[in-house]
Image (cartoon, grey):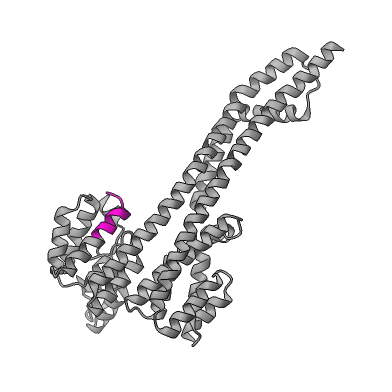
């Protein structure tokens, strides 16, 4: 529930202002019309009862994933021990070292004190608590197994955090090498090549015939040196615009389609997406969430729009009577083992247990794939850097060798 302020007129055209608690704006409008009022303006009040961005409101950033895992595990342990939910939340708020989580818990505690379900108040913080988290807590509250659901959530978060850290770790070294390569390139073009060009001109004279490679290097260097005030702003602007574009729906879609076509990277992306699908869908099914709702939430949690579309389409097919395993089997995005394990789960009624095994398998495969691509990237980057230095060396040595032959002749 959220708080809304409104301006309306009654049958006598008298302006009335006030506030209402409702699920959304349409509910407020409906309530006002039932009271024979004509709504003019309805606005959500962004207080502890409103849905807002945690970073915007508190100004202290997002809650770290490690802090969220610790909070989930501790809350699970306290609820399992029979500690009342409100007392457990107050205790966690008193002892947490995360300022962002402490401020967030103050809002949650107030809402729970006012009688709101825990899932509803968590849903007001989408930057911290994902759809998966909120839906699982809601299912746990409804079934009376909140402690067990929180254990599942903590384990799932730890697995997701581990994968994210491995991917970031694998990308750090190549990105550092790329940065060094770019800095070295511009350093050579701005400071080294112009000096070499001057030396060659002094040795061979202004009419000296230079190799094509040397001319190309001198031309590139001359352009960068002469128009650096245009080149660098354009490069920085291009990077910023590209970053903004890939955050748009169209840009994100193109990027996600592209990475699924890049050799090496494609394998890792597929394994990560399948592992997330299996673990998230398993957790939701184990929490008692309906299949269609679980598919909808899982689609948004996978992190790739191509897989999101595939799961959304699968949900439509399931709604029309098809089995999920038969739909997954026809989709090349999912390895054959996923459909086979799903079919076993559907037959035995243990889909959640079967998919956990799939998730464990593919998370191990992700580790192997990341280690493999990391081992390949290092020599490739060394070859690239060596090739760049070799080109520059060749552009210097070729004209010097030519000039020495001319002098001998």
Tell me where residue 289 sits by quadrant.
bottom left
The one of 18 and 252 positioned closer to us in this rendering? 252
Tell me the quadrant of the picture where the C terminus can be found: top right
Residue farthest right in this picture: 409
Which residue range is magenta in the image?
A: 60-71
Instruction: State yes or no: residue 64 in magenta.
Output: yes
Is residue 303 shown above or below 135? above
**Which residue shows up at 42% across the image and 56% down it?**
163
**Which residue shows up at 48% across the image and 64% down it?**
273
**Which residue shows up at 51% across the image and 77% down it?**
340
Residue 324 in the image, given as x and y percentages of width and height: 49, 80
* Residue 16 in sight here: no
Instruction: Say whether residue 247 is left or right of residue 118.
Output: right
Tell me where residue 188 sits by quadrant.
top right
Is residue 110 shown above or below 140? above
Instruction: State yes or no: residue 231 in magenta.
Output: no
* Residue 57 in sight here: yes
Residue 279 in the image, given as x and y percentages of width and height: 40, 68
Residue 290 in the image, given as x and y percentages of width and height: 37, 81
Residue 108 in the image, given as x and y percentages of width and height: 20, 63
Is residue 340 shown above or below 105? below
The one of 270 and 237 positioned closer to us in this rendering? 270
Residue farthest bottom in this picture: 321
């Amino acid at each position: 529930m959220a708080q809304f302020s409104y301006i309306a007129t009654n049958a006598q055209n008298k302006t009335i202002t006030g506030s209402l608690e409702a699920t959304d704006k349409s509910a407020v409008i409906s309530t006002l019309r039932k009271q024979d009022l004509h709504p003019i303006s309805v606005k959500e009040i962004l207080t502890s009862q409103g849905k807002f961005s945690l970073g915007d409101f508190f100004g202290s950033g997002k809650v770290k994933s490690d802090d969220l895992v610790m909070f989930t595990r501790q809350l699970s342990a306290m609820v399992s021990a029979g500690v009342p939910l409100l007392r457990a939340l107050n205790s966690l708020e008193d002892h947490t070292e995360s300022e962002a989580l402490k401020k967030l818990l103050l809002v949650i505690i107030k809402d729970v004190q006012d009688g709101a379900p825990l899932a509803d108040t968590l849903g007001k913080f989408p930057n911290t608590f994902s759809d998966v988290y909120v839906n699982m807590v809601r299912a746990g509250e409804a079934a009376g197994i909140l402690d067990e659901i929180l254990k599942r959530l903590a384990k799932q978060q730890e697995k997701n955090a581990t994968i994210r850290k491995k991917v970031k770790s694998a990308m750090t070294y190549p990105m550092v090498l790329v940065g060094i390569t770019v800095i070295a390139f511009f350093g050579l073009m701005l400071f080294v090549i112009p000096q070499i060009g001057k030396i060659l001109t002094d040795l061979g004279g202004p009419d000296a015939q230079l190799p094509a490679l040397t001319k190309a290097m001198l031309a590139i260097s001359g352009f960068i040196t002469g128009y650096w005030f245009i080149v660098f702003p354009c490069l920085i602007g291009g990077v910023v615009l590209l970053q903004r574009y890939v955050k748009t729906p169209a840009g994100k879609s193109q990027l996600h389609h592209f990475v699924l076509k890049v050799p090496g990277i494609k394998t890792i992306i597929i394994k990560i997406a399948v592992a997330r699908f299996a673990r998230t869908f398993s957790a939701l099914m184990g929490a008692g969430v309906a299949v269609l709702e679980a598919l909808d939430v899982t689609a948004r949690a996978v992190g790739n729009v191509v897989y999101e579309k595939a799961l959304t389409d699968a949900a439509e097919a399931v709604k029309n009577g098809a089995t999920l395993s038969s739909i997954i089997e026809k989709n090349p995005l999912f390895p054959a083992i996923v459909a086979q394990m799903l079919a076993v789960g559907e037959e035995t009624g243990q889909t959640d247990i079967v998919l956990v095994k799939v998730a464990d398998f593919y998370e191990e495969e992700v580790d192997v794939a990341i280690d493999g691509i990391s081992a390949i990237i290092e020599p490739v980057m060394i070859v690239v850097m060596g090739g760049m230095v070799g080109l520059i060396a060749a552009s210097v040595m070729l004209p010097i060798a030519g000039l020495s032959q001319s002098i001998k002749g």
